[in-house]
Image: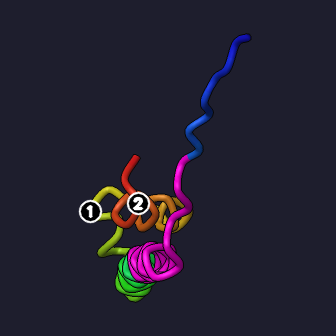
Amino acid sequence: MTTFNITLPTSIPFSDRLASLRATLSDKMAKRKVFQTTLNELQSLSNRDLADLGLSRSALRGIAFEAAYGK
């Protein structure tokens, strides 16, 4: 007669899942704030200032996204 044992992983406690969710949300909110702040600051520049920096208005969202989330 052959027998075998199955070891199932213990479930992750609710408090750990909640802490993980809170950390994830906090990280996403912080990145979103960096994105929005960067975008607002870039949009407040005049066309001449943007030209001096070598930027166009169409590139501002991409620059802000890269600043917040990386490439």
**Residue type at numbered disc 2:** Tyr
Give residue 34's quadrant in the image: bottom left
The residue stretch that appears in magenta: 9-29
Mark 1 Cα shell of 10 Å, populated few (<14), some (14-19), many (≥20): few
In the rendered image, the residue lying farthest to the front is 1
Name the residue at 49% across, 73% down: 13
Q: Is residue 21 magenta?
A: yes
Relative image position of residue 27 (x, y in whole percent): 39, 75
Query: Which comes before the other along the chain, label 2 or label 1?
Result: 1
Give residue 3's quadrant in the image: top right
Give residue 23's quadrant in the image: bottom left
Name the residue at 54% across, 48% down: 9
Relative image position of residue 62 (x, y in whole percent): 49, 59
Relative image position of residue 65 (x, y in whole percent): 46, 63
Viewer-nearest residue: 28 or 70: 28
Q: Is residue 13 left or right of residue 1?
A: left
Label 2 sits on residue = 69
Viewer-nearest residue: 46 or 36: 36
Label 1 sits on residue = 53
**Residue type at numbered disc 1:** Leu
Q: Is residue 8 left or right of residue 31?
A: right
